[in-house]
Amino acid sequence: MEEALIPTDQLLTAAVAAAHAGGSILQDWVGRFSVREKRRADLVTEADHASQQAIFELISATFPSHGFLGEEGLNKEASGSPYRWVIDPLDGTSNYVHGFPYYAVSIGVEKHGVLEAGVIFDPNRDETFQAARGGGAFLNGTPISTSGETEMSRAMAMASLPVGADQTDPAVQRFLTSMSHLQTVQRSGSAALNLACVACGRIDAFWSTSLKPWDVAAGVLIVEEAGGTVTALDGSRVDIMTPSLLSASTSAIAENLTTVLT
């Protein structure tokens, strides 16, 4: 028998609490090692797992029948429930390893495969980006919206590049091609925060063809609720299980980028 539907604000409240718990653990682990320590990569892995475990325990204590999908080997089937939580306990691992403060916790929750709520928590800036379907997007409780930029020549964008990509990689070629069309394009190392930045107007677009569902689940909904557009790179409907994503402040930017990048 299927579980009764849960008010979206309850899902969002649980997601925020869990994201803050995960972020607190990440920051606690930062104090246990330095970037010069030989074992720092192992310690980062432990921090990643500890964050995910705390998030899973908090959410599953409230919603024991729900499904889970997480970066660190978390894959729990739902038990008679339409809900699935998609978790990245540390988005921006390389940044975290090197002490570069651009990483986040990302938590999205689906109902029948449709994103219903999402939270991205940046523990360095104490910024909580959140959205519930149909309820708008917020940063620390204040409504946010995309920049509204429509001109490519004035736009700032972010792009993800696969780890170890060389100059022949199509993603690198797209990056280079985009440079002559945009005001500036960067690579930051955290897809979740890039999406959050599109949502609140700090940047105008972000794209990738190498992401996992937990990288983008929360951010896709937050951008959409902030008035932005999210599609696959070719302009078709986005599917978080497929590594193709283009988010933009406006449909004009999205359509022009699709032409440039595909």
Image (tube, rainbow, N blue to C red):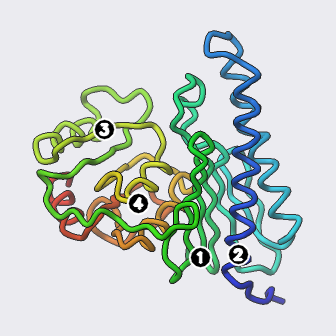
Looking at the image, residue 155 sits to the left or right of residue 146; the answer is: left
Give yes or no for contact between labels 1 and 2 (Cβ–Cβ under 8 Å): yes
Name the residue: 30% across, 40% down.
171
Name the residue: 33% across, 44% down.
159
Query: As displayed, is residue 257 above or below residue 90?
Result: below
In this rendering, which labeled residue sits more in front, label 3 or label 4? Answer: 4
- Name the residue that disc number 3 marks: 186
Looking at the image, residue 124 sits to the left or right of residue 169; the answer is: right
Residue 39 in the image: x percent, y percent? Answer: 71, 15
Looking at the image, residue 22 sits to the left or right of residue 186; the answer is: right
Residue 168 in the image: x percent, y percent? Answer: 25, 30
Label 1 CA crowd tier, 10 Å (few <14, some 14–19, many 20+): many
Residue flagged by tag 3: what amino acid is it?
Gln
Query: As displayed, is residue 89 above or below residue 229?
Result: above
Which disc, if any, is residue 83? 2
The residues tagged by marks 2 and 3 sit, at their Cα atoms, a distance apart of: 35 Å
Q: Which tag, 2 or 3, sits closer to the chain's start?
A: 2
